[in-house]
Amino acid sequence: MTGLLQPLSEGEWTIILLSLKVALVATLASLPFGIAVAYVLSRKRFAGLWLIDALVHLPLVLPPVVTGYALLMLFGRKGALGQALESCCGVVFAFRWSGAALAAAVMAFPLLVRAIRLSFDAIDVRLEEASATLGAGPFWRFLTVTLPLAWPGILGGIIIGFAKSLGEFGATITFVASIPGETETLPLAIYAQTQIPGGEAVAFRLTMVAVVIAFAAIAASQLLRDYTKRGHSLP
Amino acid sequence: MKLDVDIAIRRGTRPIHAKFALDERVAGLYGPSGVGKTTTLQVIAGLLKPHAGHVRLGERTLNDVEAGIFVPAHRRRIGYVFQEGRLFPHFSVAGNLTYGRRFSPTPLSAPQCDAVIALLGIGSLLRRWPLTLSGGEKQRVAIGRALMAGPQLLLLDEPLASLDQARKDEMLPFLKRLCQDSGVPIVYVTHDRRELEAIGAAVVPLADAPHI
């Protein structure tokens, strides 16, 4: 195995940076929706709620390839939503990095929502009542009480969503294929390297990079959590 | 300011009916546990909707079920001190105290806030976090938080119930001063009549609901 300790090549950097971009955009773009859906699932009670719950969790139970195929049918160049988005806003997902981000976001969404929903469930609604008697309307109650108290769960959701996005394989390759520099993320590249003779060294180096990114993400979340918890929990 | 309450509400299987009118500056709602004192306060504050009846404060109708009027809690400007304090754990004591000021059309001025802090003896706690406070300190901060929003009426729901006897004795002088000096009409709910005598409140007994 040669070249294990050499600096990363330009091609490898491309793969790593693309992966980080896809995972970050997927996580941050889906976060507002994740918070909204988690809040509705945690607090609202109405007839069609189970349908939203089921729809959100669908990517968790379907084979990733099926989700990818569904995305292709919906958001592909010939898909209904894909055509509408292209003609109205010039947005194209098919075989673009943005499509990889969409696939990752859809696959990570159930995990994101679950983590945030649990923290909404755990919040003492009596604190929101106290906020109301102090004059705060629904929007300010959410912003100054609910959201800060749910922050540890939101942070957990971001981390698990980011991790899932980084590792997404099946839906991505089905929806946007594996185009170097555009949609070839870390897992796709590692898989490709294992399929060609002599690719083990590169596969191993990229695997190490994935491990380092995972550790960095967990460490960052710990630091953030400790920082935001200062004061309002006992040392 | 006159508070006129005539409400019916069902909690669980138990019907609660409360009817009284207060014009005293400090009124003590008194009755045995389970008679619906806290429920009545929650209706006055707008945290619960009654099934029938009305709540009026001065000229304002806060609730009139027959006329379809319901003013939500955040527009009533009624301060509420809960049995368990309910301080915001993610704000310091100072942050809790000033929380309601930004939403209130008539928040207390800075000198008035200082006076409240002095009245309640919480000046040394401002930088602390709620988790590090004793029960009595929490209740004093909760009272200060409600006062600084400049409410038109202050509801105290068994503010001593969660404290042991020594803390109760420690709190009573503060409550007495609050009732004498704050200038805000107060409704004080308790099952212990001696507290009302200690703070000098006019006693309004809340009887069991008549069985219908």
Image (tube, rainbow, N blue to C red):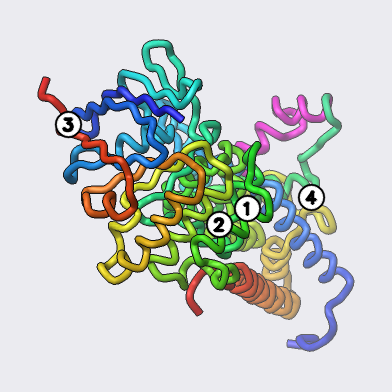
Which residue is denoted by mark 1 in the rendering?
A: B112
Of tags 2 and 4, the one toward the viewer is: 2
Above or below A232: residue A45: above
The stretch in magenta equals A66-87
Magenta run includes residue B59:
no
Image quadrant assignment for residue B25: top left
Type of amino acid under label 2 = Val
Q: Chain of mark 2?
A: B
Q: Residue at x 67, y 37 (%)?
A: A72
Assign a secondary structure to mark 1: helix
Residue at screen point 21% across, 49% down:
B193
> Label 1: few (<14), some or many (≥20) within 10 Å?
some
Indicate left or right for B195 with B75 as reference: left
Residue at left offset 72%, top offset 69%: A193
**Looking at the rendered structure, which numbered label has been put on residue B13?**
3
Magenta-colored segment: predominant secondary structure: helix
Q: Are marks 4 and 1 in contact (CB under 8 Å)?
A: no
